[in-house]
Each structure stands twice: as C-alpha cells, then as structure tokens.
Image (cartoon, grey):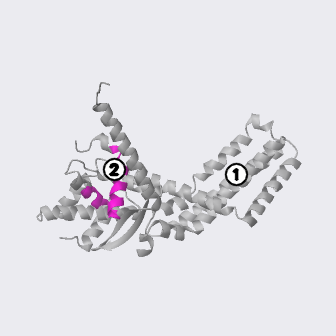
C-alpha cells in the first residue's frame, strides 16, 4: 500500500506546520515519514493515515524536527564557509592579483599622506561604515528577491541573508576608535596592515554580496540534485 | 542495550560502512538495515541519523542523488572518493578501539 498524492501533500503541510520551512529538508522528511507509514500499513493495514503519521513523528523525539533543522543549518553554514573559501581562492588569478595589490598600495599611500588625527580616523571608520551600509543594502535587495520564490532552500537563504557580515565590518571600525590604536596610526607597518584589512574586507563584501549570490542558481543545482527536477 | 551511548560515537562510521557496502541508500533504509543487521539491538533514531548524514555530506564524504520513487522524490546518499578513504580510516580506528577496550575489560593474564 503506497501513499496517495494527496497524502504526500498532507505530509508536506505537516512538516511546514512543524517549522520545516525549507524544501530540501521537507522533501527528505516527507519521504521518511511516507516510508514509515507504508511500513506500518504492511503490518497493520487498518491503521489510519493520521495515526500512522503521528507514530512516525514521535520517533523524532520530544523536540520533533528541531534537532534535524538545527544540525542541517550548521551543515549548510559550513558548506557556505567552504564556498567563500573556494571563491576567495579563485579570486587570485593574475589580472585580479595585480588589481588587488594596486588597491592595497593605493590605500597605503593615501594613509601615509593623510595627516595624523581625527580626519584619518574618520576616513578609516567611514570606509568600514560604508562597507556595512553596502552589505545591509545588498542583504535587503537579496531578501526581496527571495520573497518572490515559493520554494525556500536553506543554502539559498544563507547566501541571500548576509546581514550578519555587518558585525564583521563593525569590529575593525571599533578598533580604529580605540585609544591605543591611535598611537599606531602613523606607523608604516600599521598602515600597511590597515590597507590589507580594508582590501580584504572589500573582497569579502564582493564575494559574499555579489559573486556568490550571482552564482546562486549554479551553486544550488550543484548542492541539491532535486533543484533542477522540481 | 537498544540506544546505548556506546554506539553514539560510532554512528558516522556505521553509516559510512553501510553506504560503502550498499553503494547508495536513503535515510529510512539505513535505519531499517541497521535494525536488521543488529537483530533489533541497535535502533538509530531519526533525530540522530539525519544530522549525521548532513554533517557527512557537508564534510564532502557523502554525495547525494535524487530519484522519483512512487509519487515522491527520494534522496539517496553515496560515499564520495574521499568518503571511501575515510571509511577505511575510521573502520581501522574503530577496530583499534575495540581491541583496546577488550584488553581493558578482559585482560589476558599470563605468567612469563
């Protein structure tokens, strides 16, 4: 005895009602529940669909699907970090290396030329504020794009929701405002390190905010074989 | 003995070993196979199986494949090349562990 299409749809609704928002996970859990229900029917054909469904759900424990969702998010976040690393490595091809190093040297020269004081501090902080604003704007833009999709994929949500990176840009901004760093502002090594940090942050912004989201379709098809089927 | 904590640390190795033998399997099939092989002694809970599978997938040790079965899509897991190598390593580690445990709980005393 196999489940009907309506019962399968009912299982999709059931997973959504238990906070499984992403289609990739719903698909797997629906098949699991369906297999369990069919197995129960083999031993007890009189059992109702509802009862069999609840019996299967109980096997997930008192927290239901919560643990599976939590661990899935962890696994997908790891996958996302690997993606950042992959595109970071890809970035270092010859024309881009020259452009990036030119940027580092340009910023370094600018930092050397600027007089020590509030203006220099303000400009450096301004750069990081600028990065945060671009990231926030980009997150807003990407979130809007996701609203239009009727099927949510966990990795897609992680790719499109980059608001958390803003925190990363705020850390160096706060460092620049600390008293002890002010003394280093005229130090050549500190200026070089700051130039490298600004360019690295800019690169991170480019990869997370633009490169990876632009390849989202390709990445999702690579991650989820069901992406193209459904 | 059912869901003893003793099995927990070996869950990933059990999954890798099964997939290595069977080629590819889906979640429910894994739970049933483990139950069958252990004659009902070991029951992998759903709440532990999927997180383990997703972790192994994120580590690049498993690959996924989707097929339409009956009126739904089914996700199959299969070991990657890296996963096959890792299975050998983890099984060796597990065997070493079992040997060490046997020596600890059941030492063979000998007078030389």
Assign a secondary structure to mark 2: helix
Q: Quadrant of residue A3?
A: bottom left
- Most extreme residue toward the top is B111
| Left or right, B15 with reference to A105 | left
Q: Who's the residue at 46% across and 54% down the image?
A: A75
- Nearer the camera: disc 2 or disc 1: 2
Residue A58, horizontal then vertical, whole percent: 24, 52
Point 40% across, 68% down: residue: B65
- Magenta span contains residue B16: yes
> Do tags 2 and 1 sit on the same chain?
no
Q: What number is the disc on residue A177?
A: none
Per the image, the residue denoted by label 1 is A129
Chain of the residue where label 2 is placed in the rendered structure: B
Q: Distance between the residues labelled 2 and 1?
A: 43 Å
The main secondary structure of the magenta stretch is helix
- Name the residue located 86 percent from the left edge and 52 percent from the top edge: A109
Quarter that holds the N terminus of chain B: top left
Q: Which residue is depicted at the point 71% across and 51% down?
A: A128
Q: Is mark 1 on a helix, strand or loop?
A: helix
Image coordinates for residue B28, horizontal then vertical, percent: 28, 60
């Amino acid at each position: 005895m196999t489940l009907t299409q309506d019962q399968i749809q009912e299982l999709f609704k059931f997973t959504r009602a238990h906070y499984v928002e992403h289609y990739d996970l719903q698909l797997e859990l629906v098949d699991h529940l369906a297999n369990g229900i069919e197995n129960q029917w083999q031993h007890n054909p009189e059992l109702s669909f509802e009862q069999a469904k609840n019996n299967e759900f109980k096997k997930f424990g008192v927290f239901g699907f919560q643990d599976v969702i939590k661990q899935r998010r962890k696994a997908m976040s790891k996958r996302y970090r690997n993606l950042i690393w992959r595109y970071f490595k890809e970035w270092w091809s010859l024309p881009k290396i020259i452009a990036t190093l030119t940027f580092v040297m340009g910023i370094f020269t600018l930092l050397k030329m600027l007089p020590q004081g509030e203006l220099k501090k303000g400009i450096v902080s301004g750069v990081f504020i600028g990065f945060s604003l671009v990231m926030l704007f980009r997150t807003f833009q990407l979130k809007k794009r996701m609203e239009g999709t009727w099927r949510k994929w966990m990795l897609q949500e992680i790719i499109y929701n980059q608001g958390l990176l803003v925190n990363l840009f705020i850390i160096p901004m706060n460092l620049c405002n600390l008293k002890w760093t002010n003394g280093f502002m005229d130090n050549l090594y500190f200026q070089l390190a700051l130039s490298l940090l600004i360019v690295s942050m800019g690169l991170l912004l480019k990869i997370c905010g633009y490169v990876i989201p632009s390849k989202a379709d390709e990445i999702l098809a690579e991650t989820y074989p069901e992406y193209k089927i459904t | 003995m059912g869901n003893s904590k003793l099995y927990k640390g070996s869950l990933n190795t059990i999954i890798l070993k099964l997939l290595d033998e069977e080629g590819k399997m889906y979640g429910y099939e894994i739970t049933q196979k483990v139950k069958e092989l252990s004659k009902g002694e070991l029951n992998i809970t759903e709440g532990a199986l999927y997180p383990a599978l997703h972790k192994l997938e994120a580590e690049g040790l498993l690959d996924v494949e989707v097929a339409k079965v009956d009126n739904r899509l089914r996700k199959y897991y299969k070991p990657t090349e890296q996963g096959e190598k890792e299975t050998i390593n983890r099984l060796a580690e597990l065997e070493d562990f079992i040997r060490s445990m046997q020596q600890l709980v059941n030492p063979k005393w000998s007078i030389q």
